[in-house]
Image (cartoon, coloured by chain):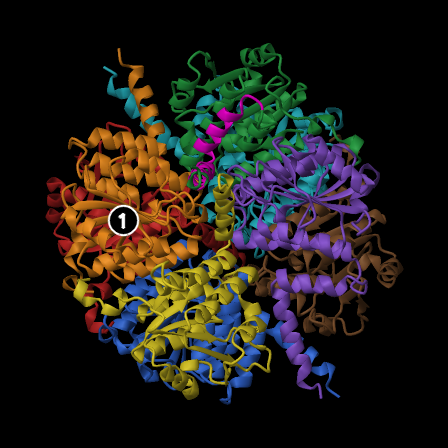
Chain colours: A orange, B yellow, C purple, D blue, E brown, F green, G red, H cyan
Amino acid sequence: MKTNSIDPKFYEMLTPQNAALLLIDHQAGIMQGVHDFKPVELKNNVIALASLGKIFNLPTIITASYAQGPNGPIIPEIITMYPDVEIIHRAVINSWGYAPFVAAVEKTGRKKLIMAGVTTDVCLAFPAIYAVQAGYDVYAVYDASGSWDVMSQQCAINRMIQAGVKVVNWVAVAAELQKDWMLPTGPQLAKLFADHLTFYSMLIASHQAAASINKK
Amino acid sequence: MKTNSIDPKFYEMLTPQNAALLLIDHQAGIMQGVHDFKPVELKNNVIALASLGKIFNLPTIITASYAQGPNGPIIPEIITMYPDVEIIHRAVINSWGYAPFVAAVEKTGRKKLIMAGVTTDVCLAFPAIYAVQAGYDVYAVYDASGSWDVMSQQCAINRMIQAGVKVVNWVAVAAELQKDWMLPTGPQLAKLFADHLTFYSMLIASHQAAASINKK
Amino acid sequence: MKTNSIDPKFYEMLTPQNAALLLIDHQAGIMQGVHDFKPVELKNNVIALASLGKIFNLPTIITASYAQGPNGPIIPEIITMYPDVEIIHRAVINSWGYAPFVAAVEKTGRKKLIMAGVTTDVCLAFPAIYAVQAGYDVYAVYDASGSWDVMSQQCAINRMIQAGVKVVNWVAVAAELQKDWMLPTGPQLAKLFADHLTFYSMLIASHQAAASINKK
Amino acid sequence: MKTNSIDPKFYEMLTPQNAALLLIDHQAGIMQGVHDFKPVELKNNVIALASLGKIFNLPTIITASYAQGPNGPIIPEIITMYPDVEIIHRAVINSWGYAPFVAAVEKTGRKKLIMAGVTTDVCLAFPAIYAVQAGYDVYAVYDASGSWDVMSQQCAINRMIQAGVKVVNWVAVAAELQKDWMLPTGPQLAKLFADHLTFYSMLIASHQAAASINKK
Amino acid sequence: MKTNSIDPKFYEMLTPQNAALLLIDHQAGIMQGVHDFKPVELKNNVIALASLGKIFNLPTIITASYAQGPNGPIIPEIITMYPDVEIIHRAVINSWGYAPFVAAVEKTGRKKLIMAGVTTDVCLAFPAIYAVQAGYDVYAVYDASGSWDVMSQQCAINRMIQAGVKVVNWVAVAAELQKDWMLPTGPQLAKLFADHLTFYSMLIASHQAAASINKK
Amino acid sequence: MKTNSIDPKFYEMLTPQNAALLLIDHQAGIMQGVHDFKPVELKNNVIALASLGKIFNLPTIITASYAQGPNGPIIPEIITMYPDVEIIHRAVINSWGYAPFVAAVEKTGRKKLIMAGVTTDVCLAFPAIYAVQAGYDVYAVYDASGSWDVMSQQCAINRMIQAGVKVVNWVAVAAELQKDWMLPTGPQLAKLFADHLTFYSMLIASHQAAASINKK
Amino acid sequence: MKTNSIDPKFYEMLTPQNAALLLIDHQAGIMQGVHDFKPVELKNNVIALASLGKIFNLPTIITASYAQGPNGPIIPEIITMYPDVEIIHRAVINSWGYAPFVAAVEKTGRKKLIMAGVTTDVCLAFPAIYAVQAGYDVYAVYDASGSWDVMSQQCAINRMIQAGVKVVNWVAVAAELQKDWMLPTGPQLAKLFADHLTFYSMLIASHQAAASINKK
Amino acid sequence: MKTNSIDPKFYEMLTPQNAALLLIDHQAGIMQGVHDFKPVELKNNVIALASLGKIFNLPTIITASYAQGPNGPIIPEIITMYPDVEIIHRAVINSWGYAPFVAAVEKTGRKKLIMAGVTTDVCLAFPAIYAVQAGYDVYAVYDASGSWDVMSQQCAINRMIQAGVKVVNWVAVAAELQKDWMLPTGPQLAKLFADHLTFYSMLIASHQAAASINKK
């Protein structure tokens, strides 16, 4: 397609000032249905993404559907990280179809929305698509979301792309927000990478050990 | 692409009032050729999708090609569920190329078509593409359809997306139709999930057991 | 190895008279941890295996660990099928390390034990190995059991084989028990295959349709 | 995208009158490099596609690159099937960059081109993209083509889609061309399916056997 | 294990004089349930194995279970290749449990049995294990057999190995029987490889083309 | 094999009193070469296994090869967990070929050795095999070890099994050591499962939430 | 889409005169995190791509991020091949966000950019997208790049395609640049294929051997 | 099995003094049929294994079958490495069935044989099994061998294990031979690892760069 047929948003990047973080239905019950990621990977990724909200001081919204039923409560790691964020409880499946949720997003004043949800095909895809329609630039973080299997994940990703959503992994989100390792959040992000991008902690340990050999 | 270059239909959702259900060539012979899903999965998904027609009272059309030949009869589970729907028999491969089929669709008055077919590359993709051309918003349900292998499934999905078809899984269709768990169809859909989204029946059993511990 | 270095039991087969069925820890909570089978497959297989106890009138024992805790209750389908079997509740992990369980097995008088358990590496492998030591011929049904992932399943299978356990799938168990389609249980088993060996129901439907073409 | 932003060609279908068949570089040497299909699958698919040219009487063009070198000769099955088609020999990599090839295509007078080539990323993708630019509607048959591995196949498919090529499997091509099983080519195509869509020969054998049971 | 703890048969090889070929339940209906091989692969392998009986003049036995029911008839390719072999029809599941079958094997006077069957877990594994007990050296040809999925295939293979069966592929059987390419059956086997070990036909075509370049 | 041909050790289980823990070459450099597990999984499993030494108070030995070179230092998580264990540094590849290591094992007085190492084919397999020869009962924990790819992992597992090693996953080791959830280490192990057998933390969270609903 | 809605660049090809080569962050540390390719494949592909710069005399730019830290130095093979290219060192993550890098690109005067980077989702995708915005035609070479796993690779590829990047493999780049085997770079490229497209060296060896048989 | 039921050879290791290297049928034609490894991996592994003969000064035997036919010549890399080894040409399929080959092995006086062959199921498995029978301790190097697909590789591995062959990867062979990094061959092996165990070259580059930081 001609460059001018592509929406300029596809060439824009996230900044800590233009983005909000939306965590949708990361509930202990529904997450048991996730089979496109192993549980240890999914939890690792969800915590990593949630941590970006802290590191970059992003407005953060958390919502849950029927937490008192089988879907279960938001996982404790998120609750602990965001003790002051009031969870928005819904019976409406599409969170973007629930006015208080949309109001909370609008209140952030941010036009770029980093979203993750369990499951990808419903809890993430529905609000992601609606948000694009409402004029937002949506980053759907597929690896901090989860689906019934890889096929349904891919299907949901295709559908989001068809509607103009950007689908990304959490590391790319982190790198976009950081932009330059010299900026003040650099050390915090490096620590997050060491904790959640596991090979990196090994790289650091190796590097420090080697660097210290002749250090005296 | 610019938001305004995307057809508004990609931001619309299914409702029980705007959708019809089209079940194409779920025949006992041709289904033996399906290798992108295990038989137990495919049957589970087909029955789940077919049940949505009942739960949401959707106009439902069933068609078969050469049922008296090797392709075999529509599987008995569908026949039993829709005893009053007259099967439209064809020799024309593309069901949308067969006037009585198109007439039946038009008669529903619905503009959003939920379609599944065996096989995905022919029996689903051909009418899905033609229906988009005819102005319909098509939901091709890939996991209640089946193909020769995963590669040919993916190929058919790409082709449908290229022509403007929405490709979805049956759970997403169910969630779009339900919209809000408080609506009257909620309990029926919950039962369907328990029966066909297997982890959910376990979630419910666990939840009920735990909830009853202190219930006295 | 020389033929005479192989234990004769490897050339013996199951009969409805020499076998008992042991269902271990098929609990709604712990089954959420299974990732070597899709939920729909696992439930299908577990119900199929459990049904063999009914069809062939096998002594059947059901046990659970900590059903009141997160492991959850035995799945309702098994409870419904065996309303009169009293579940043996344990805190001991290895069911063969719990005297009432072993006593129940001994009471059956059967020397061939068909076992399945969730998870394969612990709840199935431990008692399977102990039972071989105690002189039983154990059939560990891997596909009515479940593990954390395929690797851990394979690891558990290797360990059981190393200790002299036979590892089989539920269809092979059914076929061994049936032996001859002319025996009285034939029609019941054919129905079970139609219900749980999904392609078979399609085969039957196709066959009946074709056979009826010239039937008049 | 809005329906009217989609090129009408995506809603058109092949007919025996509007299509030509282009077989590109199916050479015995280069085909050894194919690792996205097993050799038995690839050969089966290539022969099936080539046979469509015979069944539907399509203008057929065959080209080879450096057949006297390591790339080797066109496989004998194609030579035998098309003894009268003169192979167009090239040193130019992109067959569409070689005037005699383009001239041969133009001479067919057909605007829809069914193409397959080994390898997918070069021998198929290059002329497929150029042909779209030249105003043709291109059907790239990925499963009668072959690539270095599945990833490079997918990469080539994405690139062709990006340029407006239709990517399809040979069965879909066959079904488009046939359109209606009542048309004269029906029996020939049924035989081709029996020979190359292997499950179908078994379906037919089962059906005939069942149908003959009461046939007297 | 000490060398002398291994049965000497594991160091013996097949010859056209010591082996018989047993084809078990390659029926058009039951073969639709095979999902560890693609249909095109399975048929290719079954025909290749069956052809070895012809090339090496092996006593060949064919049996079927309930061919008049959904299991369907022996596939036509085998019937055509062995028009004079009378099919042994059974209702007994384990062919080795059916006296006429065992009698037919004994009548061959061969002590090494090349067996293939659909499905692997029942129709192949049961008689393979019984035959070992009866003192035969069994070659179970897993790739001319088929199972419900790869896991059940592997499970059946493990069980056969545990009982002392040799599990092999058809190419290894062919090579054992041939022993030396100079023996009279060499050209016939080379032709079989060209037809069914697909890459080999391409190798030959390339070789012949290259060899002829300077041939004058 | 006859029951009495199987070494009795295969029917014995680990206890906190009969076992020692050997952690071999979990070094930050060499672990980068692991491709049979994702880094996040491997680290999770290694820490879980190492923690069992703490929970069950097992004698624990840590060794490293060339830690000052590219192999890098033992990963910091292990160092932190075992600050008082002196790492045994070697240039000898097979740790069981290095006298101080063997001496350290002998000093524990334990005859059952739980071993993990990176890489599986060398650092784990070599000492595991030697230790069996020396009369130990070896538990090789494949999922707290890592190899170049899945094939080489499987190859190493087969070789260890051939030599009489038990190959297990860390969860099975934990369950063997715990034996009965009522024993004092129960709560500590439950916490370890919540932290490293990720689905279990979600199960607990769901259970507690459900149990508290009627708790008043 | 209508042909005229597709940017003409998708029908243009690379030439040695219109392209530059950009090698981004192929550093010995960060490359340890790559898990979508085996190390041997990735290095093979990176060297092959880098060699194209030499063969076709392309302006070549090399950049690294924090080479003195854990990310490590550019791999020695690239340094050795391009001893005269000064590496552009950055702390800015997106190389296109670093002015000296963009200036270097502009200085080449080329409008088609062949890019590869480790990792794909960040080091390749970010500058690829920015470069398209800046009016360049970008060829992102996915197989000379590397990502955390296949899913994140695919995600990055989708995102690049959405923004109008061409995603290709190195062999396709080589073939586009060569265009015609008769051009002077032919022999050099043939040698590169023999060295890095491994099957090709075997094809050549076979061909030469066969061709020499009658060569006298 | 009881420790004393295991042949002591399973606890013995290779040394440069007790081993010979046998390279069987690594021919440019037959290697095109290998599909369990990518060509780049297989060649890498074959060269690495062949190099061990040089580094450890092992008696090395090379054999080929019908090199003048489609199987093609021994790949040039081996020829170049062993210019003085005379290739043993055979028509007999099983190299151990060809007296000059066996004589050459006997002449080495070594009792441990490191073997690799293409293909695994025939060219490797046959002589490996015969050599065990003849009293040799055989190391079959599966990853310097190649088969038609992964299933046939696994099948061949199982068969070799059943007959008492050790199946290993080339890295394990290298490590057994080296035993201690302090021995004189250490630097040569380290170089081989850097060249063929690709991640290791990156590890070394990273380590050297880090170590040099404070080196002044």
x and y, in percent, of residue B101 in the image: 43, 84
Tell me what residue is drawn at x 67 percent, y 21 percent: F133
Q: Is residue E161 above or below residue F143?
A: below
Main secondary-structure element of the magenta-colored stretch:
helix
Q: Is residue F198 magenta?
A: yes
Question: So how many labels did they put on this image?
Answer: 1
Decide which of H141, C77 is in the foreground and name it.
C77
- Left or right: C73 as drawn, with respect to F39: right
**Residue A208 image offset from top left, x and y in percent:** 30, 21
Which residue is tagged 1?
A: A115
Magenta region = F183-210
Quadrant assignment, res G43: top left
To which quarter of the image does residue F175 belong?
A: top right
* Mark 1: secondary structure: strand
Position of E90 with respect to D159 (left or right) is right
At a point 83% along the width and 57% down the height, the residue shown is E97
Amino acid type shown at disc 1? Met
* Residue G14 drawn above or below residue A89: below
Report the front residue among A201 and E10.
A201
Question: D168 or A31, which lies in front?
Answer: A31
Quadrant where the N terminus of chain E sits is top right
**Front residue (pair H32, C101):** C101
Query: Dot 1 falls on which chain?
Result: A
Q: Residues within 10 Å of mark 1 (few under 14, many from 20)?
A: many
Determine if the magenta segment contains residue B79.
no
Residue in view at x 45 percent, y 25 percent:
F26
How far from the left and from the top, in percent, is residue A191? 28, 29
Identify the residue at horizontal 34%, vertical 52% (top origin).
Answer: G154
Does residue D53 appear to the left or right of H2 in the view shown?
Answer: left
| Residue C162 in sight in this render | no
Say if F199 sits above or below B59 in the image: above
Residue C202's quadrant in the figure?
bottom right
